[in-house]
Image (cartoon, grey):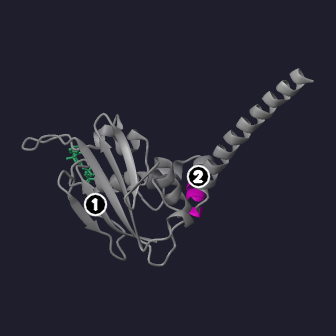
Amino acid sequence: MRFSKIRLNGFKSFVDPTDLLIGDGLTGVVGPNGCGKSNLLEALRWVMGENRPTAMRGGGMEDVIFAGAATRPARNFAEVSIIIDNSERLAPANFNSEDQLEIVRRITRDAGSAYKTNGKDVRARDVQMLFADASTGAHSPALVRQGQISELINAKPKSRRRVLEEAAGISGLYQRRHEAELKLRGAETNLARIDDVLEQLA
Ligand code: ATP
């Protein structure tokens, strides 16, 4: 499973549809100040399900939509797509039937975010789990933003452990455990209710 292309449309400074081919060996992006390097990395995190506006350097998620410039009006939506080459069939089971995967996230003003995988509507959670199971995602330590190395050096052991867990691809298990615990609690409540009813009937 390999990222082969990212497409941005109306995302931050990328107002016009822009394709970036991700060839073998691409490890970094360089360019003059303010040209959009960080925006590009944020687009990659965003399409993988980032849900904290602060991680996008914004106050609200709609701040990722092109806000207008002297010569261009603001846009009403932003969309980022990531194309994944899955010819080696390494994608997690639920998504492994196609040679190519396209994940799209779109945000529209006042309507929030919507996700699609290969044209089908999916939930944010499905996309987050897809990437978590593939040992990547919005919090992947493989995406290194400015200042992150010094943050890691100064981080508390608990935060460092989280980085190792992301890299080991086990962070999705925490989400699944949390959901299993919620279901278990629901089942326990139902059992207690049944006991009450049985007692009343006895
Ligand atoms: P540096 O090297 O200085 O860190 P950079 O190449 O990482 O710069 P970015 O931070 O990615 O640059 O891009 C900054 C540019 O993106 C600024 O010109 C800013 O005005 C523009 N920008 C950010 N959000 C939006 C938005 N919602 N609408 C329009 N432009 C935006």
Q: Tell me the quarter of the picture where residue 184 sits.
A: top right
110 or 20: nearer the viewer = 110
133 or 71: nearer the viewer = 133
Q: Is 185 on the left or on the right of 169, as rendered?
A: right
Q: Is 200 on the left or on the right of 31, as rendered?
A: right
Residue farthest to the front? 201
Q: Which mark is residue 162?
A: 2
Magenta stretch encompasses residue 165: yes
Label 2 Cα neighbours within 10 Å, binned few <14 / some 14-19 / many ≥20: some
Residue 31 spot, x, y in % from top left = 22, 61
Label 1 Cα neighbours within 10 Å, binned few <14 / some 14-19 / many ≥20: many
Residue plotted at (40% across, 44% down): 55
Q: Is residue 167 visible?
A: yes
Residue 127 spot, x, y in % from top left = 47, 54
Q: Which mark is residue 46?
A: none
Quadrant in the picture for the C terminus: top right
Residue farthest to the left? 71
Dot 2 falls on a residue whose secondary structure is helix
On whether ligand 1 comes within 8 Å of the CB at mark 1, the answer is: no
Residue plotted at (65% across, 44% down): 178
Residue 112 spot, x, y in % from top left = 35, 39
Which residues are the magenta region? 160-168
Q: Main secondary structure of the magenta part?
A: helix
Residue plotted at (43% across, 54% down): 48
Disc 1 marks which residue? 7
